[in-house]
Amino acid sequence: MNLINFFQVVINPIFSNQIIFLFVFFIFIIIFLSIKNRITNSSNRIIILLLFLIIIIQPSIKIEKRKIQKNVLTFVLDKTDSQKLASRTELNNNIYKNILQQIEKEKEFFNILEITIDNDKYSKRFGSVDEIRNSKIKSQDFYHKNKSTTKMLDYVKSEINKFPVKRISSIFFFTDGQIHDSKDEWFKKQFNIPSYFIIPSLNFFSDSRIDVENYPEYVEVGEEIEIKAKASFFGREKNQDLFLTIFGSNGKVERIKMKVNETKNINLNIDKPGDNFYVFNLTPSDEEASIFNNQKLVRINASRKKLKVLLISGEPYLGTRVWRNFLKSDPAVELIHMTVLRPPEKIDNTDMRNLSLIPFPVKELFEEKIDKFNLVIFDNFKGKNILTPLYFQNLVRFVEEGGGILEITGPSYNSRSSLFRTEIGRILPGIPSQKSLRGGFKPRLTELGENHPITQKLFEGYENYGEWYEMNKVMIDSEDTSILMTGINNQPLLSIKKINNGRIAQIYSHHIWLWRNISSEKGPYKRLIKNLAHWLMKEPKLEEDKLEISSDDQFIYIEKKNFKDSKITNSNIIIINPDGKKNKLKLTKVDNKNRTGKFKFDKKGHYLILNESLVKNTMTPEFDSLELTNIHINENFLNKIQVSGPLTKIIKTNGGNDLNFKKIDSLQFENKNQSKTLFLPFNYEFKVNETRKIDLYNRTILSLLILIFLIYTWKKESEKKGLDRKPNP
């Protein structure tokens, strides 16, 4: 732009402003009194004072050669994943070219800041309209990690903050409405400038979508929840039905037929603690624009409201009360405690009519209601002559189907009535040796115990804990059994074992109560009991085996890390496809603790990986993107989120040729909603190239003038006084 001269009168007073003010005030007083009293030669006095004032303030003319700066029009081009569908990028490029062509007539007033947002970077170019149109300027690239989102406003903020506010004119966003930092208050408050969101008219693609809502994040195990699922279809008219497949971490698969835009209530029964995953997959149509919004993963965390525990005690001893009181004090435990005070083999002469004992309800507990319990605890229990083989077989089935058994073995474990001598003995970890070991000892953790979640932090805070004095000597011959603690002569003290879907734990001493009753040397009995109970009930936090999942563009990689060495060559994994199909994969042994495998997927989306009690979910890389969950261009979305202030306008256009541009000097709010009219405010921001100053005074001349007026005034005053002295004739 051409240089223009700007003139301005300035002063450079030799005294402070207060003195200048007093002097001007004095001049006004003189003028007032002179007029009021009609003093002769008052004009001369005023002229003298004004000349003095000019000398004091030293006025001059300041001349600036100013160059008017071009304002900045910002164009933000969204080229992320959602814009690559249905040729949106090409449409936006054409609109952008047409807009630049129309703005060319105002090119002497504006420069262009172009910001392009891509998946892993944003680029910028800055230059004149001609330079941008003819691609004479190379772009600068800035890489980022927001691959799954469009952080559009964040990048705009960082770039336009490099310019003075007055140079910023309109901002144009080429978008589909997906702006994932739209709540940024900076954009609403910082700039009072027009912001235009350019959306291309696009009605020639078809796409279906599943939305899942109204589900709780946390529930109780056994609770049935209701989830709302809505199947939507966009684009061309669709009359045929849509098909929804639902599969979860419980392995169940359900298929439902739905109408377009129908909302169905889906009931799900949450049957396991920890994370429960459910995948909702809407079968894609042949003309599907994107499959990325055909799936939704629902994650629900479940916890047990009540842990139903059956505690069966044998011959009473001091530890019985410890177990009973601890379990009753836990609000999460619903306890039924039965103590066998008079086993069948006990013979005394007491008349039955004088006994107040309650008959042991074996049929009710071990046949009718055994599956109602989560955990059965046997405390120093002799079972052989109390329960029939049928009831022990029910207990074996209870464990194999997912239940838990904990046995605290006392001296009775070495007797002929031991639980080991019953049908349940075949699944118990410890084989009694008929020997008891006596003498003071402190329970110690084995190498496995130091790493198992049950006992890993057992002795934290217990530098000096109490001793136990008796334990059973047992033999462990099963490789499936893990010994976590040892006692006298490093003999097994605590062992755990997994059997099919269930679990068993045994403590080979009944002296755990000593950790509670000896005040000087207490031990972590509460922590041990609680961790054992929760492990037996498959608490996810206490799982010792780990399942790690990763994926790339072709494969899902699975690595299972076993807690202990295993000679099993292969381990079976169940993988559920996005369409609900189950696949079996055998993991290959790397060493005694690690198994690996990879699964080549042919469908993109969410996958569930199941192995025993372990459940993981993963998704193919493209699905980890907010960009592809809402691909439908909709200006109502931008209106709803109110991305900017009152100067925002959302423009839907066919190619950009139907838009009008108007350069204005001031923006009027009442004009902002003119249809298809886009305002280009121009602020006269300038840069000073040269400055000159011309003084409006000359001290020598002004001093001579003051002297002349003083002499002239003095002469006039003298003449007047001379006339006044002459006598009247």
Image: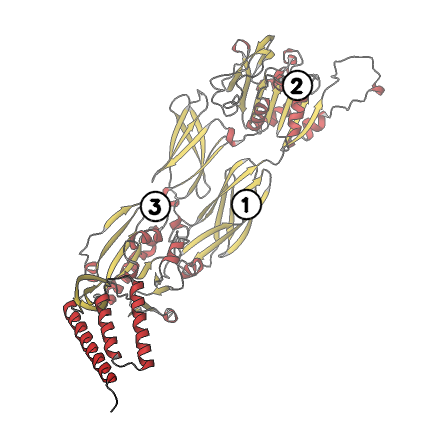
Q: Position of residue 537 (x, y in %)?
A: 57, 29
The amino acid on which the numbered mark 1 sits, given as a three-letter code, is: Pro
Read off the residue under disc 3: 147
- Report whether 125 appears left or right of 584: left
Assess whether mark 3 and mark 2 are in contact (beta carbons under 8 angstroms): no
- Of residue 540 and residue 572, the one placed in the foreground of this image is 540
Q: Residue at x 34, y 56 (%)?
A: 86
Instruction: In this rendered view, identify the residue nearer to me: 370 or 521.
Output: 521
To which residue does mark 2 refer? 319
Q: Secondary structure at mark 3?
A: loop
Marks 2 & 1, CB-CB < 8 Å contact: no
Left or right of residue 462, residue 690 in this image: left
Sooner in the amino-acid sequence: mark 3 or mark 1: 3
- List the single residue furthest toward the bottom: 729
Q: Is residue 722 above or below residue 64?
A: below
Which residue matches tag 1?
216
Q: Check the picture and name the quadrant holding the C terminus.
A: bottom left
The quarter of the picture where the N terminus appears is: bottom left
Whichever of labels 2 and 1 marks the residue nearer the N terminus, that label is 1
Q: Nearer the viewer, residue 456 or 251?
A: 456
Q: Amino acid at mark 2?
A: Gly
Mark 2 vs mark 1, foreground winner is 2
For label 1, the SS is loop
Residue in the picture at 30% in, 55% down: 160
Cα distance in 3D space between marks 2 and 3: 60 Å
Mark 1 is surrounded, within 10 Å at the Cα level, by few (under 14), some (14 to 19) or many (20 or more) other residues, namely few
**Residue 154, percent from left and from top:** 35, 51
